[in-house]
Image (cartoon, rainbow, N blue to C red):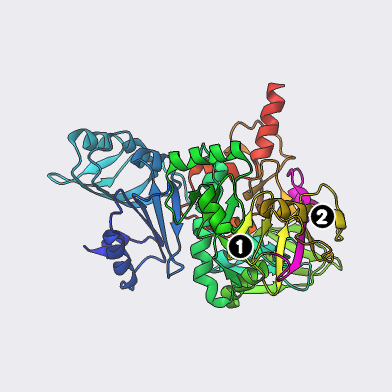
Amino acid sequence: MNWQSVWGERTHFVMFDAAYGDGAAFQETLHAWRNDPQRPARLHYIALAGDALPGYRRVPQVEDAVTLDLLTAPLDAALEQLTARLDAIRLHHAGDAGTRFAHALGKLAAPGALLDAEGLSHAQMATLARAGFAWEAGAQRAVYASRRPQPEAAAPRARYAIVIGAGLAGAAACERLCARGWKVTLIERHAQPAREASGNRAGITMPLLSKDDNLMTRLSRAAFLYAQAYFERIGENGIDSDRCGVLQLARDGAHAEVQRAIAAALAYPPDFAEWLEAPAASGLLGAPAPDGAWLFRQGGWIRPASACGAMLTACGEALVRRFGAGSVSLEKRGADWCAVDAAGAVLAQAPVVVLANGTGAADMPLAAGLPLSAVRGQVTHLAEGAAPALPFVLCREAYLTPAVGGLHSLGASYDDDADPDLRQSSQDQNLARIRTMLGDPALGRDAPLLGRVGFRCVAPDRMPLVGALPDPEAAGRIERLRDVPRHQGVYGLLGYASRGLTWAPLAAELLAAQLNGEPLPLEADLVAALDPARFLLRERRRGEVG
């Protein structure tokens, strides 16, 4: 194949493959891209795969300039949820896919997109022709030649950004933008990264499950899988972690019945999630687990500060750090945003600013109207030996980690107050939950008051906020998310609650892809569910109904 004619003048090349199979076509494309000095700057390969887990999955690659997205869904459903502009399409083994997919494919194809097919029916070819594909005579090859108006390309934006906040959200944003060639200035009010909600000794990584495979579950699955591969890839920069597994106990008999139904209906691969009945769960725990448990073999713990450090190290010289900045305000000057400290000095200037400062965003006017709350969480620390030496993380209403640096972490409380100090009542609550889970009423008795208090940034629907921030002062009718006025150049990575280690890498990847004009790594309905404007849209809709 003459790849140079396929690449054309594109800087981002996007290929869709309807049958990933053993990955041979991807490897051929990747080999051609690697060995062509005239190659596009970025290669995006999107393919349908028969993966055991449903949904979209972005698989990190060796080169930052390459993305691989594997979609497990019927062809028409996958295309309808895809946000991308396709430059080449491979429609092999799609003969039994019906014709509904053709319309979606026509909407996604870029002008001049090449289509290579095999085994299509006459009906499928005719429907694709009506969608805008012009077939070559006597061949199943076509070029997208629709006459429908094409939107004008937006003027290129200077790839400079300011990121506010050096916790998990901000560090991941810096790394994902720098990996795409952006220049980033990171501003943190503390002297070091990971000083607030990301400062715990150990955080937990695990997926969520639900009987209806709802939005939260789907996001959790995609984010967990991406985070596992992502942290493994940048782990050479020094991440303190252990993929030791997580054992999640059922709460009671009724809860166990629901979990059995999930296990039967969704048939997860055992290396992702395995339901254990009471005998197996009790044997693994070394204590009674009468209602059974889920075992997440790939889950475990990570020290968040070490993850932040690894992500920032990976940024290299593309990142400028402004730590110890104290209180910072944002001012619009021309086309740029300026970050200004309390003394009036400009710390950074860029056309893009990302608020990734958790609960601190509530104090910034640009985030006004976002329904974020600060939820107090106290983690209790027990000296090694004061709790069972379990080889995995144990969780139910609370969690217990293996000893990290000589201390077990357990908790964390969910408190509706702003007390920053350790207190005995929260420690007693944490210990009571772990005692119940282990059946050990003496665990932690007379333990000293050790631990840490942090404040989680939480949205009402418990989902994170990823994307352009809305302008609640703008007037006008709002019917859809795309109608919501936005603060120009202002984006958010907020509301991670207690799931920052799981959500941060994929959320940052999503935002970086949006800013770079690339295919998005999640289904369109999930992207909409994370849009920071969703709350304003609901509010306006309620107001119209009322």
Q: Is residue 343 left or right of residue 75?
A: right
The amino acid beneath tag 1 is Ala
Q: Which residue position is annotated with label 2? A: 428
Q: Give above or below for 404 relative to 128.
A: below
- Residue found farthest to the left: 138
* Residue 314 pos. (x, y %): 56, 74
Describe residue 14's horizontal placement relative to residue 159 as left or right.
left
The correct choice, above or below, for 258 with respect to 220 in the image is above
Residue carrying label 1: 173
Q: Is residue 41 above or below residue 497?
A: below
Q: Is residue 503 visible?
A: yes
In this rendering, the answer to whether 505 lies above or below 37 is above
Q: Nearer the viewer, residue 532 or 212?
A: 212
Which residue occupies 58% across, 66% down? 391
Instruction: Point out which mark residue 199 bears.
Output: none
Q: Does residue 116 appear to the left or right of 60 in the view shown?
A: left
- Taking the view exactly as shown, the residue that stands out farthest to the top is 546
Q: Position of residue 173 (x, y in %)?
A: 61, 62
Q: How many marks?
A: 2
- Determine the residue positioned at 30% across, 43% down: 145
Quadrant of the drawing holding the C terminus: top right
Residue 491: x and y in percent read: 65, 53
Magenta stretch in the rendered image: 359-387
